[in-house]
Structure formats: structure tokens, C-alpha cells
Amino acid sequence: MNLFWIFNARRLKHYLIMFTAALFAVGIAWAERDNLSIFTSGKSGPYATYKVDTTEKKLALTFDISWGEERTGPILDILEKKGVKKATFFLSSPWSETHPEIVKRIQKMGYEIGSHGHKHANYSSLNDEEIQTQIAKADTILKELTGTSPKLIRTPNGDFDKRVLKIADKMGYSVIQWDTDSKDWMNPGAPQIVDNVVKKAHPGDIVLLHASDTCKQTHLALPLIIDQLREKGYEFVSVSELIAGAKTNTNLVQ
């Protein structure tokens, strides 16, 4: 009899622990309900695009620029020498103001220009008004320099939350992320940067690269990236061309 009660007491304790854990999980989900949003097709609300679903061997090389003047020129030279006609550059507006001649060169070469915001800060840490101000400042500056307002934005550090998505959407922007990170910002060596891109690249991919001075090896890796992706049959397109008419792939937004 004692064994029977011990056994049932243990089973009851086990059930109580499971029940408590379940209640705890539900409580967290309820408390965070305003900060969670699931976007599966991009049809139900603002979303961030990481890649597109396609069987065509097309991908977008994207370059973020926030500071410096030594690395962008060589990268543009390589793209020109290799005959890469389409790429997307996300430019921070303070950098663009101080380097208008480079902005003009990017535009003249026919590359797509997107916004990389104004102040280099995590947008999820800002209030709604500050987020709108940062996007608007960058929009004004880039429009003055290029003649048109960007339609794409990659937020500083790729940081965003549901609020950022909603505000950007209301301001006419699509938030663009990436599915393949070259990790050139870590300066791991040109061979490693090449491997980081080529081994993971896939149809519909958006590749993250940088043309800021802090990334000292991108210009060394880029020729090999271009050559090896072409050997695999890839065509380089802009982000806008990649997503036009394609099914976007989105992630859970925390």
C-alpha cells in the first residue's frame, strides 16, 4: 500500500510540474502577445525579406556602407571589371552627405540604392517617433543626392522589431535582410569570406557584404565570389528585381 501511494504521489508531482510549466509558457506568450508577429507569406502585414522562393539561379549581392572612403572605390572597380551590372547598395545618410561623389558613381553605374538609415543605432531600442525621424532624415538626404526616394531599407545592424516594420511600411519602405552573411565584417580572411558566401548561396538568395572601411578584406574576396558563383550558374540581380513577382521568404519577428 505504501508503495502504491509513493508511486501515485510521484506521478501526481510529475503532472503538477508539467501543468505548471504549461501555464508558465502560456503566460509568457500572453504577456508578449503585442511583441510577437508571425508572417508566413508577407500577405498579412509588414514583413522583412530575407530571400525569395525561386528555382531560378538568381541572387542579389548587397553592400552596406556606413563609414570610410577607402573600400568603396575598389569594390566598385571590381564590379565594373567583372561586368556585374546589378547590385544593391544600402547607404547611411551621414556617409552619403560626406561622400556625394561616391554616391553619384554608384548611381551612374546603375546600381540600386537603398537606405541604411541615419544614425547607426538599433531601431528596436528607439521609440516610434525616433524610428520615423531616423528613416525620414535618411530619406530626405538620399533623395537630395540621387533625385529619388529609396524604396528599400536595411536598418543599422539589421535590427528591427514589429514596430519598425509597421513604421517603415507606412513610410513606403520594404525592410530587407539577408539569408547569407559573408561575415566580412569580422575580417576572417578572404578565403573564409569566399567560403561563407559560395557554400551557402542558393537561388533567390540575398547576400550581405560591406563596403565600409572597417571591412578590410571584402575587395580581396569579391572577385573570387563573383567567379565561383558564375561557375555555379548564378546571375546577379538587384534586390528589387529579385523580389518582383516572387514569393518572399519571411521569418518570425520578435
Image (cartoon, helix red, strand yellow):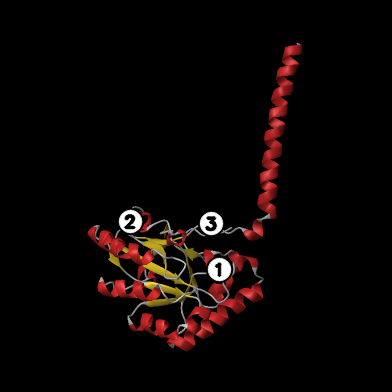
Mark 3 neighbour class, 10 Å CA radius: few under 14, some 14 to 19, many 20 or more: few
Q: Is residue 232 left or right of residue 36?
A: left
Front residue of 21 and 191: 191
Q: Residue at x 32, y 80 (%)?
A: 109
Q: Amino acid at mark 1?
A: Leu
Q: Earlier in the sequence, mark 2 or mark 3?
A: 2
- Dividing the picture into quadrants, the one containing residue 7 is top right
| Element on which disc 2 rests | helix
The alpha-carbon separation of the residues under discs 2 and 1 comes to 30 Å
Q: Amino acid at mark 2?
A: Val
Whether residue 145 is visible to the viewer of this picture, yes or no, is: yes
- Dividing the picture into quadrants, the one containing residue 73 is bottom left
Q: Farthest top residue?
A: 1
Q: Earlier in the sequence, mark 2 or mark 1?
A: 1
Task: Classify 21 as above or below 166.
Answer: above
**Residue tagged by mark 2?**
198
Task: Classify 65 as above or below 38.
Answer: below
Q: Amino acid at mark 3?
A: Leu
Instruction: State the image coordinates of residue 229 (x, y, percent, origin top left).
Output: 28, 60
**Residue tagged by mark 1?**
165
User: Mark 2 against mark 1, which lies toward the viewer?
Assistant: 2
Instruction: State the image coordinates of residue 141 (x, y, percent, origin top left).
Output: 51, 85
The alpha-carbon separation of the residues under discs 2 and 3 comes to 26 Å
Labels 3 & 1 near each other (Cβ < 8 A) = no
Numbered label tally: 3
- Dividing the picture into quadrants, the one containing residue 64 is bottom left
**Residue tagged by mark 3?**
252
